[in-house]
Amino acid sequence: MNDWKTLAAARGLQLSDAEIDKLGPILEGIEAAYESLAASLTPLDQPAVTLGEEAVEAR
Amino acid sequence: MMTLLEAGEQLRAGKVSSVELTQECLKRIDELNPKLNAFLTVTADTALEDSRRADAERASGLDRGPLHGIPVALKDNFFTKGVRTTGGSKLFTDFVPEYDSAVTEKLVKAGAVLLGKTGLHELAYGVTSNNAHFGAVRNPHNPERIPGGSSGGSGVAVQTGMAYMAMGSDTGGSIRIPAAYCGTVGLKPTFGRVSRYGMFPLGFSLDHPGPLTRTCQDAVAVHNVIAGYDPRDASCSPRPAENVRLEEPLYLKDLKVGIPENFFFERLDPAVDAAVKRAAQVIEERGATVIPVRLPDIGAINSAARIILLAEASAAYEKEHLGRRGELSAEVLALLDQGRLISGTQYVNAQRARRLLSREFAQVWTKVGVLFTPTIPMGAPPIGASTVTIGGVEEDVRMATTRFVRPVNLLGCPAVSVPCGMTSEDLPIGLQIIGPPFGERKILTAGAVFA
């Protein structure tokens, strides 16, 4: 479990305990979803950040 | 109530004038807007002036096409020169752009009459259009219900006849959601098909402008005007815009309609499930072939889309997020806070996953021409509700509303929501038709069977 309050402060956000209580579970959910996504990646997989038609068609 | 194309025919036949159509829309706005809050700004004087010009041009023999003299509206995140553009945010309450968005330019050039700017969820970052700064936009089917968002005002304006067309923008479903909840057609074109120049951004790699209309034929008319390359938008497709014509034969007998076996029919209002399956029967009766199809992991696609949107939105509004927190609603502030806590690694890896998932999804188009899915699992929730219960499971309104629409933004595919029934509470149900990149003609041909 991340210390979201400290992480938020490091990113310039001074969040109250109430705000952290609300955000924490959401962020944990995002983390879990991310872990599952990242597990499928190999170092050779490129990002889809080339914008434009080629990117859409390649997708 | 006439459709956009019917109004255009009446104009060409000299049976009605643009001034009359505009006056009629302004009258409806006067009557309904105090109750429904669809418009943030009404430009009555310039609209009447523009309609007089359109009538004079038509009388002189100039015909600018199907939108010439037609009263339309723009979501208030499209820049309009000299007309306040708020983005639904207190941050931009007094912002008056010095130039038009590309879409505004194209509509004006096509002779459309701009009635005003429609209300939206703050910064287009939400699904309810319950705006903390400008008030709740209300669903015409039941004013105690949300119209959906973020293009809620556009859905209401079209559904009630306050405008013949209203533009929306769609980052995680924001055109298709109000279309489904209000009972209109909502087209999200292929990513890059319509220029985003002169629009407030939300998700740089997810934002799509598109029209809300009464019919798919009307959506085609608007799409043909607004689609095309624009060098001012770095992600705009250089592919020449096809002039879509539904009357040209795209025989339904050649169309394979895929019905997803996974994800899209899980946890639905039974009326939604039945309406979408009935729509599949209808198109089958019209000659199409309906086949079940297994889709890649839509949950993973949604996760990647969510991470990308959180990070991109927080990047877009970083200065405002950090410097003007007091001017943001608690809801949007929380989303921007979440985005700031997404790491660079997570964002890049979500974009890497996007590429993999998109390649996998592209295989679907070797089996079917379009997909039929519900747009949203249920009818419009009450204003202020934060959760809904579907199939005995309590779910966050935002998550439930975006479940079926958000993945399409990640894929960049075109999709349209068309009305296909009503729930037991007499609220509209949307059928979402998804097609391959640049397959607008396919989805709108299929959609025209229903609206």
Image: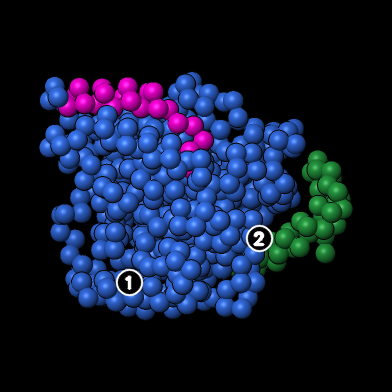
Chain colours: A green, B blue
* Dominant secondary structure of the residues highlighted in magenta in the image: helix
Asked which quadrant contains residue B157, the reply is top left
Write the residue at 24% across / 68% down: B255
Residue B311 drawn above or below residue B431:
above
Instruction: Name the mark on residue B279.
Output: 1
Residue B285 locus on image (x, y percent): 22, 76
Vertically, is B231 above or below B136? above
Q: Can you tell which of label 2 and label 1 is closer to the viewer?
A: 2
Q: Is residue B47 magenta?
A: yes
Image spot of residue B345 (x, y percent): 68, 53
Q: Residue at x 19, y 35 (%)?
A: B16
Lower sequence index among marks 2 and 1: 1
The residue marked by circle 1 belongs to what chain? B
Which residue is label 2 attached to? Answer: B386
Q: Is residue B176 visible?
A: no
User: Is residue B153 highlighted in magenta?
Assistant: no
Q: Is residue B298 visible?
A: yes
Q: What SS does tag 2 mark?
A: loop
In the rendered image, the quadrant that contains the C terminus of chain A is bottom left
Q: Position of residue B330 (x, y in %)?
A: 72, 46
The disc labelled 1 sits on which kind of residue?
Ala
Q: Chain of mark 2?
A: B
Q: Choose between B397 and B410: the one closer to the eye.
A: B397
Residue type, mark 2 in image: Ser
Distance from the alpha carbon under mark 2 to that under mark 1? 30 Å
- Say whether residue B77 is left or right of residue B367: right
Q: Which residues are magenta?
A: B38-58
Mark 2 surroundings within 10 Å by alpha-carbon count, few (fewer than 14), some (14 through 19), many (20 or more): few
- Outermost residue, front direction? B31
Residue displayed at 36% across by 27% down: B47
* Dot 1: element: helix
Question: In the figure, is residue B301 to the left or right of A7?
Answer: left
